[in-house]
Image (spheres, coloured by chain):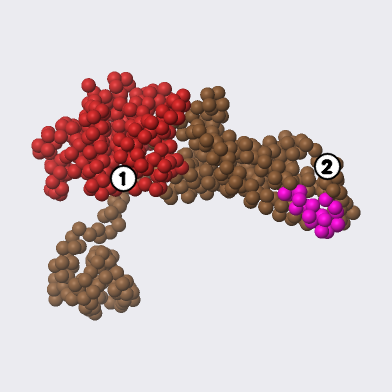
Chain colours: A brown, B red
Amino acid sequence: MSEAGAIPKAERTIVLPKRLRAAEVAALLGEIHGRQGGLALDFREVEEFDSATLALLGHAAQDLPGVTVVNVPEALVRAGAGFAKSPSDLWPARPAVPATGTRAGRFVRALADRFLARTRVAASFLSMLADEAYHVGVYLKTRKGVYPGEIGNQMFFMGYGSYPIVCVLLFLVGVTISFAASDPLQSFGASTYIADIIGYAMLRELVPLMAGVILAGKIGAAITAELASMTVLEEVDALKTMGVVPERFLMVPRLAAITAVVPLLVGLADVCGIAGGMVVSGIKYGTMPKEFLDQMVNTVAWDDFAWGLVKTIVFGWTIVISAGYKGLTVGRSAEEVGRATTESVVLSITLVIVIDCLFAFVLY
Amino acid sequence: MDIIRADRLTIGYGGEVVLRDLSFAVPAGLITVVLGISGSGKSTLLKSLAGLLPPLGGRYEFSGAPVDYGSERSLQSLYSRIGVLYQGGALLNGLSLYENVALPVRMHYPEIPENMVRDMVHAGLAQVELAGSADKYPAELSGGMRKRGALARALVLDPDIVFCDEPSSGLDPITSSLLDDLLIRLKETFGMTLVVVTHELRSIERVADRVLVLNDGGLRFDGDAAALAASDDGFIRTFFLRKGDHDDA
């Protein structure tokens, strides 16, 4: 920093204004960067300043060649004494870890690390799956470890919140599938088979899959958000130190509730999906409801409904356990609650589709 | 008699050491205050003593028996004898204050009839002067009421020791002082042992019988409140006099 009046090699001097805060500093920086030749910044009139002014002082001395500062008031010098001049003051550089091995070797090692990390997560998820099976067993045997009335609360939350949307969406799916199938069937002169297609597709595939996806988005996300918030707010720790097992206290009611809620959900969704197909069939071909249903029962059987129900229950358990896993393994910040919720929905939907595919190998 | 004995206890997260080689004892029937600046590991120590964070090394004895963090039986035995007051209260938001306080009773002793549970809960709430707020949910309570409610929950099964994590944090001086009174009353009336983590000087002066001071990942001071006041340790004097003249804090 130059002494008052001494301006070495500067071709131009800017006398800075009385008020030199962030806005004025920003404007000044444009002028500094657009300059040609040496420049002196004269601080003699500066009275109002802030951290941007101090940063300017530091940068002018270090990072702006050809720029000098002069007549810096004592107050500014004092304020700048404890001011970090560069990011390295705040974040000292960590000693660099020397790279070892060839580039290909490092790439393979990085891949292996990622694979191991994913394997650990998968193992932890499977461990929770096994734990939950154990906790359900213990609860069924002892009837202890779950808060009285909590299963009913969860049933109400899951059923009341899910039935309307599942019914409406499955009705619309029935309508869409019916429209999509009608033209190809008509071209083969097989319009009467629309009822068979709708019935079979709804009971076996579309209702379980759509219900799974909707439950993942609605119930799975809600469970993760709730459990993750409880984890962040130390409520889960509080349960532990009260001698309550959180994995049983929080998860068993939800698993029981989803098991109880799904049969009615599947039944309603089947009815709504078939009704959607029946409406389109009536509009396009003038098929009467009785005629449609008679045709449908020729093809579909009770085991189609039963398999659809079994699949949806398995999807429900998968969703609850995925949601619980993400909620109970969240970190300690509020930001992670949102991230865990998103990850839970993605994980649930992925697992629902994978399990559906495995069912296809068994059933067809 | 010491209720807690720690021998060369090393505590941390995922291999990263926060506190190293702590050896101390917590005498029964007294209030032991754990003191230190923010980030000194006070809450981490409390978590470990409450059985939530396995130590990386050393030995922890509770009532003369070693605590085995790998054994569910050992941890359940510890949990059945402690109460914890968390920093934010940690009342379950989905349950009313009454249900929160009743929770430990209902979970551990489902055979106790509901009318007896009611009496136990009301006695607990009266003890913390919240008898009129039993039906309120945590969201309807002030910060101080939430903490007192959480204290009632921690006390409802008459634990041998209560761990309090920064009971005064976020409270105004009057509410904070009332909470301190409550802790003193618990000690004097019921002979309860308390471990209180705090950095509130006013609280320390009022409630502390013994003090553990944490600094730089270790135990800086272990003694009674009078010895702490007379200490010529630079860090401790700085802490109490709020002067920045020590060189190693």
> Which quarter of the rendering shows the N terminus of chain A?
bottom left
Main secondary structure found in the magenta portion: helix
Amino acid carrying label 2: it is: Val
Question: In the rendering, which numbered label is found on residue A297?
Answer: 2
Question: In the rendering, which numbered label is found on residue B144?
Answer: 1
Question: Where residue B158 appears, x then y in whole percent?
Answer: 33, 28
Q: Residues within 10 Å of mark 1 (few under 14, many from 20)?
A: many
Q: Secondary structure at mark 1?
A: helix
Q: Is residue A345 left or right of residue A43?
A: right
Q: Is residue B87 left or right of residue A133?
A: left
Magenta stretch: includes residue A303:
no
Query: Which residue is outermost to the bottom?
Result: A12
Amino acid carrying label 1: it is: Gly
Query: What residue is rendered at 33% in x and 40% in y?
Result: B130
Which region of the structure is painted magenta?
A272-289
Residue A299: image quadrant is: top right
Q: Secondary structure at mark 2?
A: helix
- Can residue A343 be seen in this snapshot? no
Alpha-carbon span between mark 1 and mark 2: 65 Å
Query: What residue is rendered at 30% in x and 35% in y?
Result: B127
Q: Residues within 10 Å of mark 2 (few under 14, many from 20)?
A: some
> Which quarter of the rendering shows the C terminus of chain A?
top right
